[in-house]
Image: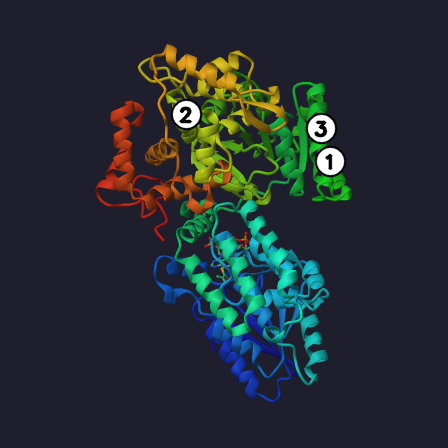
Amino acid sequence: MSELVRTHRDGDVLVVEIDNPPVNALGPGVPEALAAVLDAADRDDGVAAIVVRGAGRTFVAGADIATLEDAAWGDEAAAADLHDLLRRVEQCRTPVVMAIHGTALGGGLELAMAGHYRVADAAAQVGQPEVNLGIVPGAEGTQRLPRLAGVAKALDMCVSGRPVTAQDALAAGIVDEIAGEDLTASAVAFARRVAARSSHPLTSERAERLGDPETNAPLLAAARAQAEKIRRHQVAPLKAVDAIEAATRLPFEAGCRRERELFFECVRGEQAKALIHVFFAERAASKLPEDMAHLTPAEIRTIAIVGGGTMGSGIAMACANAGLDVILTDATGDAVAAGEAAIRTNYDATVARGRLTPDAVADRLARIHLTPPAAFPARAVEADLVIEAVFEDLALKQRVFREIDAAARPGCILATNTSTLDIDAIASATSRPEAVIGLHFFSPAAVMRLLEIVRGSRTDLDVLVAALAFAKRVRKLGVVVGNGPGFVGNRLMFPYMYETQFLVEDGATPAQVDRALAGFGMAMGVFAVDDMAGLDVGARVRKALGHFSDPRERRPLVHERLVAMGRLGQKRGAGWYRYDEPRKPTPDPEVEALIRSLATDAGIAARTISDEEIVDRAILALVNEGARALEAGVAARASDIDVIYVNGYGFPGWRGGPLFYADRRGLGEVLARIRAFHREHGERWRPAPLLVELAERGGTFRGGALHGRAGARSR
Ligand code: T1G
């Protein structure tokens, strides 16, 4: 028998264990091995019931996404054909009980639903997350889920992609029982109870929860509206609704055929290619490079944070949310109190939205130990990691690091949350530069998933490994980047921002630029982002990065003026936009007039700017700088840049990130466009040498850029 599927007997119950590490995906060989075991069981009169479970940490986490990727790139035969297996499961003469622990996702839940019964561990989760990969469930999930859970629940799960808890699944009718402590024992006992029944429920034959056209119409309409809202521009969620609609109208087999058509339409599409790229890119980014794989990360339990402002308090929440202890301090008692107030306000809002219970908040608050500055040195010795989150000023940070260096225990990791400053310069203020690292959180730090982990020239590998493990522990996506100006994210951001500022000087308006970028798929327009972050923040960073020190460079005219006018963005009710209502930008004729007058004074005549020009100048500025970052080695892989932009800067995942986007558009065309900009706008558009090299030899960023330290994963 194949090692992918093992069996043992518990009396008259056959326990089948799928063992395909790490997550029991239904990769090549698994469906066949499972079918063979079921065939044998059906022939064996001594087997009264079958329990199917996953080995290790989880039930089946779905089809093997690598095979989906092959299918997306044209090898349709690679996409696991699970239909025969599911039919085989359902038609088993012997009742099949699926025993679910960990996560039953995608094809995992589809397999579970083909069984006659389902028993779930209390901590298990089940879901149809396929939309995250730009596809619809492809193994009958859109047909079986509405039959078990009803149309509304199926729509919600397939459109949002969010898994549900075992308790929720029980209430919805997806599972039949929650297991006790021992899942296998519970499932075996359940199997014995049902074995003697004369017949067993077949999901495919159920119709009682499928509703009727009249009651379904508003549900389908609401799901389509929901898809447009939470997954704008994406095709898969709408196709998932189509597939569920087919379930309500067609017999089971015909509905499955329709689902399959929709599945292949998706998997062949650009969005699936992009989202599957992001899936693997995220995992590649957070993986240890080979030279570190042997290192065991030191455990981080207690974190001291210096600075209780927006970033410091957000980081404190992120740590407390993950069950870690936090010592939070600032330069004055008042500042500590302000940090505490900000944390409480944020948690209160979470409770008001129903996301956390007051008890859970109390538990988290109890983990955050507010510490006046005088008491800090004595407490800091408890910390495994100290994170500095003070004002973005090198001299100040160096002073804080000297203090931290004096207080922290040997072996403690010293991290700075700087978004732009030189890690080595900060490290040089300490007696242990090898313990210093950058942890660049994104705002709001308790929410945003991205964490740039900045490796200084002297940072120890042990420290890097511990930082990656810490990122995982606080549920962040850690991406290791080099210590260059602006690291990766902000390095690319500034050329993008400047270009959009030139666009408004050339004749566009901030609102037109933002609309064009939203149309491209950016989560927010660039001017709205600048207003949210604060124009003063941008100005400070620009200075720190030393941009526009060359007088021959074209320099944006408006930003500095807005700062001087006190139009610092949302917090002042005015920036690039006006804010009559909090957080709601309204175009401001005064700003538009200011832009025109400054541009006219500088001899720039206004012309009509197309949305296409806006998108090209903004996005290709990211691409060109991305190529430079890769070449400079501050990003190890092209896909790391994509991960950073998708998770930290609102770049649409369904376009795969800036460099994947460039690949798909064709580097030859991208280069031609950048060369045209170079001729028209001058040196800032000089094509990155790496881009020229790849384009000229017909290569792609994805296929492997030449210079990155770790090299691209060429899947
Ligand atoms: N296929 C292949 N590899 C997978 C995989 C999968 N489904 N899921 C995870 N991996 C790999 C992953 O690349 C990584 O590998 C390792 O497992 C650990 O993952 C027909 C079309 C299960 C919650 O979308 O959500 O079924 O980098 O680091 O944080 O309708 O992985 O170590 O080499 O993420 O503990 C639907 C995706 C597929 C589930 C575990 N299923 N996976 O999280 O570990 S489409 C999914 C996850 C489908 C059917 C269709 C998570 C996890 P490596 P990890 P984790």
Instruction: Please tell me which residue is depicted at 67% across the width and 39% down the height of the picture.
Output: 320
Using residue 239 as the reference point, say whether residue 598 is left or right of it: left
Kindly identify which numbered label has been placed on residue 474: none
The residue beneath circle 3 is 340
Dividing the picture into quadrants, the one containing residue 118 is bottom right
Disc 1 on helix, strand or loop?
Answer: helix
**Left of 163 or right of it: where is 337?**
right
| Furthest-front residue in this view | 214
Q: Could you give the CA–CA distance between mark 3 and mark 2, rounded to whole angstroms?
A: 43 Å
Residue 655 vertical placement versus 683 (above, below) = below
Q: Quadrant of residue 397?
A: top right
Examine the rendering and report whether any part of residue 457 can be seen: no
Horizontal and vertical percent for residue 105?
56, 60
- Residue 283 appears anywhere in the view: yes
Q: Secondary structure at mark 2?
A: loop
Mark 1: give few (<14), some (14-19) or many (20+) Cα within 10 Å: some
| Mark 3 nearby-residue class (10 Å; few <14, some 14–19, many ≥20) | many
Q: Amino acid at mark 3?
A: Glu
Q: Report the amino acid beneath label 1.
A: Asp
SS assignment at label 3: helix
Q: Are marks 3 and 1 in contact (CB under 8 Å)?
A: no
Q: Is mark 2 within 8 Å of ligand 1?
A: no
| Mark 2 or 1, nearer chain start | 1
> Label 2 amino acid?
Ala
Q: Residue furthest left?
A: 696
Please report whichever mark, 3 or 1, sits nearer to the chain's N-terminal start: 3
Find residue 348 and name its label.
1
Q: For mark 2, what is the residue?
A: 508
Position of residue 169 in the picture relative to residue 465 (left or right): right
